[in-house]
Image (cartoon, helix red, strand yellow):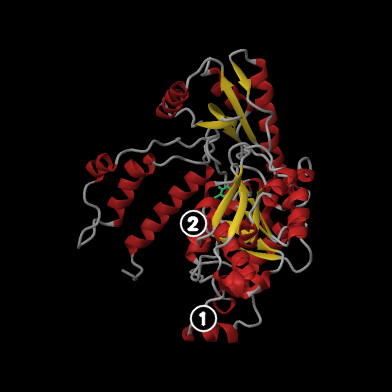
C-alpha cells in the first residue's frame, strides 16, 4: 500500500491531468446533489477487503460522484457565500498535501508555519490592530469564533474568583452568523440578541447593557460585532461598539468571516473603522481571500491571552515546547492540535500574484454588487430590498410568494444554469422571503447577472 509501483505512477499522472483540467476550467458544471441510495446504485460497493483498484475508483469519482457536488466556484453560483480559490492556491493545496507537514508546532512545521505567518502578517496589517497583534489559520470561521470566545471567557474568568463560578453572557445582534450562537452553546455561555438585522448601533447596545440586571451585568464579558453580515453584508458600528467595550471593560470580538476580505478594498475600508480596536477578529480566507477550503483565521490583539486559554499540556508534548520554544506554535492559539498548514496555499498565491491583485479581485466583487443593483433597477419586475452592501444584494421579484422563489431556485439548479437561493429579510416584526446574490468570484460577468434576473421575468 505504501510502495511505489507502475500503477501508482500512472494513476498519479491521471490524477494530475484531472486536476489540471479542473483548475483551468472557467465554467465548470454546476453539479447536482443526489440521494445516497441513488449514488450507491450507481457506484456499488466501493469499500471491500481486497479493494476495487484505483482506476475503477477514480472512474466512479469522475463519472458519478464528482457530478453530485456543487462547484462552488461556478460564476453563476451566487448563493450562501460562494468561493473562488485562485488557481495558484488550488495548485499549492496539492503541494501542501504532498509535503506531509504537521502544522501544530514549529519544531515539526517551521517552513510551512513561516509561510503561513508571512501571509498572516498581511491579514493582520489589513485590520490595523496595534503592534503585537497576531493570529492563526483555523478550519473556518466557526472554529475561529469558538477559539476567540473561549479566549475571552478564560480571560474574564481569570480576573476574579466570582467570575470562575458564573455562567458568562455575550451580546450580539440577530444579524450575527449562526455559528456565534452555536459556539456560545459549546462554550456554555448565554447569548443576548440585540433585535436588529440592520447595523448594530452603539446606542442600542448601550441600552441593552443598561437594561441588564446587576447579576446579568456581572456575567456579561463580551460583545460580538459583525464586519459584514452573511445575509446582507451589513457592518455594525464598530467604532461606537469599541468605545462601549472599552468603557465597560468588555471583550470586543468582530466576526468578519465573510466581510474581512473587503478590508483590502480601498473603496470600502472606511466602513470598518473601529476594527483596529477589537480584541479578536475572525476572517475567512476561504471566502473573500480566494483560498481553497478550509481556511479561516482568528486574530488577537494580545495573542498571549489566547495562548493561556488554548495551550495544551501533555508529557509527550513537552519536547515541542523546548525545541520549538524559538518558534510560533499555531496549536497554542486555537482549539485544534494536529493541523494542516492550511494557510500555505494562500501564502503561495499571495507571493505569486502580490497583494494588489487581491485588492482588485475584491473590488470586482463589490463592483458586481453595484452592477446588479443597477440591473435590478432597470427591470420593472424586480426591485431592491435595500441598497447593495459589500457584495450582497437583496431583491424581490414583485408578486412572488416564498414558494415561487423556491421553485425558481430548484429549476435553475436542475438545468445546471445557476444557483441563487432565497433568504429572509426582517422588517419590523415580519420576515419577507427575498432573493439574494453574494458576489465573490471575479469571473462572474454582467451577462451572467442579466441572464439570472431575466429568468425571473
Ligand atoms: C461563513 C461565516 C461564518 C462561519 O464560517 P465557516 O468558515 O463556515 O465555519 C461565521 N461568521 C460569518 C459572518 C460568516 O459569514
Q: Is residue 179 above or below residue 393?
A: below
Q: CA distance from mark 1 to mark 2?
A: 25 Å
Whether disc 1's CB lies below 8 Å from ligand 1 is answered: no
For the point 30% across and 56% down, the residue is: 54
Q: Is residue 390 above or below residue 142?
A: above
Q: Secondary structure at mark 1?
A: loop
Q: Secondary structure at mark 2?
A: helix
| Residue 234 relative to residue 381: left or right | right
Q: Quadrant of residue 126?
A: bottom right
Residue 43 position within the rendered picture, expressed as x and y whole percent measured from the top left: 25, 45
For the point 20% across and 62% down, the residue is: 50
Q: Is residue 104 above or below residue 78?
A: below
Residue 51 visible, this orientation: yes
Q: Which residue is mark 2?
A: 185
Question: Of residues 344 and 405, which is closer to you in this image?
Answer: 405
Q: Quadrant of residue 352?
A: bottom right
Say few, some or many: other residues with alpha carbon within 10 Å of mark 1 (under 14 / 14 to 19 / 20 or more): few
Q: Residue 6, labelled with which disc? A: none
For the point 47% across and 40% down, the residue is: 71
Residue 353 position within the rendered picture, expressed as x and y whole percent measured from the top left: 69, 52
Residue 283 position within the rendered picture, expressed as x and y whole percent measured from the top left: 63, 53
Question: Of residues 158 and 61, which is closer to you in this image?
Answer: 158
For the point 64% across and 68% down, the residue is: 156
Residue 86 visible, this orientation: no
Q: Which residue is mark 1?
A: 313
Question: Of residues 292 and 310, which is closer to you in this image?
Answer: 310
| Residue 45 relative to residue 362: left or right | left
Residue 257 position within the rendered picture, expressed as x and y whole percent measured from the top left: 61, 50
Mark 1 and mark 2 lie on one chain; the one further toward the N terminus is: 2
Q: Is residue 372 above or below residue 134?
A: above
Amino acid at each position: 500500500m505504501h510502495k511505489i509501483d507502475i500503477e501508482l505512477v500512472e494513476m498519479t499522472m491521471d490524477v494530475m491531468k484531472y486536476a489540471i483540467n479542473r483548475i483551468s476550467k472557467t465554467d465548470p458544471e454546476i453539479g447536482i446533489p443526489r440521494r445516497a441510495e441513488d449514488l450507491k446504485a450507481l457506484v456499488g460497493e466501493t469499500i471491500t477487503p481486497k479493494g476495487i483498484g484505483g482506476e475503477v475508483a477514480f472512474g466512479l469519482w469522475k463519472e458519478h460522484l464528482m457530478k453530485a457536488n456543487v462547484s462552488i466556484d461556478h460564476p453563476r453560483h451566487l448563493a450562501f457565500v460562494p468561493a473562488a480559490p485562485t488557481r495558484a492556491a488550488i495548485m499549492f493545496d496539492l503541494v501542501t498535501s504532498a509535503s506531509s507537514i504537521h502544522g501544530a508546532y514549529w519544531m515539526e512545521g517551521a517552513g510551512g508555519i513561516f509561510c503561513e505567518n508571512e501571509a498572516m502578517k498581511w491579514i493582520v496589517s489589513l485590520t490595523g490592530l496595534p503592534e503585537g497583534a497576531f493570529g492563526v489559520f483555523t478550519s473556518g470561521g466557526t472554529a475561529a469564533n469558538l477559539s476567540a470566545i473561549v479566549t475571552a471567557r478564560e480571560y474574564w474568568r481569570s480576573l476574579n474568583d466570582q467570575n470562575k463560578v458564573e455562567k458568562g453572557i455575550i451580546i450580539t445582534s440577530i444579524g450575527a452568523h449562526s455559528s456565534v450562537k452555536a459556539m456560545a452553546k459549546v462554550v456554555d455561555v448565554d447569548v443576548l440578541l440585540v433585535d436588529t438585522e440592520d447595523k448594530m448601533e452603539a446606542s442600542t447596545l448601550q441600552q441593552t447593557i443598561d437594561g441588564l440586571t446587576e447579576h446579568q451585568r456581572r456575567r456579561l464579558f463580551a460583545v460580538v460585532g459583525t464586519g459584514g453580515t452573511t445575509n446582507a453584508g451589513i457592518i455594525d458600528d464598530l467604532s461606537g461598539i469599541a468605545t462601549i467595550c472599552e468603557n465597560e471593560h468588555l471583550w470586543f470580538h468582530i466576526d468578519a468571516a465573510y466581510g474581512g476580505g473587503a478590508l483590502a478594498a480601498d473603496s470600502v475600508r472606511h466602513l470598518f473603522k473601529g476594527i483596529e480596536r477589537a480584541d479578536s477578529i475572525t476572517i475567512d480566507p476561504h471566502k473573500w481571500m480566494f483560498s481553497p477550503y478550509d481556511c479561516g483565521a482568528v486574530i488577537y490583539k494580545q495573542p498571549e491571552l489566547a495562548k493561556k486559554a488554548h495551550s495544551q499540556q501533555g508529557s509527550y508534548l513537552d519536547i515541542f515546547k523546548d525545541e520549538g520554544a524559538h518558534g510560533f506554535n499555531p496549536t497554542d492559539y486555537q482549539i485544534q492540535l494536529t493541523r494542516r498548514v492550511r494557510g500555505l496555499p494562500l501564502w503561495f498565491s499571495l507571493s505569486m500574484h502580490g497583494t494588489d491583485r487581491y485588492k482588485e479581485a475584491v473590488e470586482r466583487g463589490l463592483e458586481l454588487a453595484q452592477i446588479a443593483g443597477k440591473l435590478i433597477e432597470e427591470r420593472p419586475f424586480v426591485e431592491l430590498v435595500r441598497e447593495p452592501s459589500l457584495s450582497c444584494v437583496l431583491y424581490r421579484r414583485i408578486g412572488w410568494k416564498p414558494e415561487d422563489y423556491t421553485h425558481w431556485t430548484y429549476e435553475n439548479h436542475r438545468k445546471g444554469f445557476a444557483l441563487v437561493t432565497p433568504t429572509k429579510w426582517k422588517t419590523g416584526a415580519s420576515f419577507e422571503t427575498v432573493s439574494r446574490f453574494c458576489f465573490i468570484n471575479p469571473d462572474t460577468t454582467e451577462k451572467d447577472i442579466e441572464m439570472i434576473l431575466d429568468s425571473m421575468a
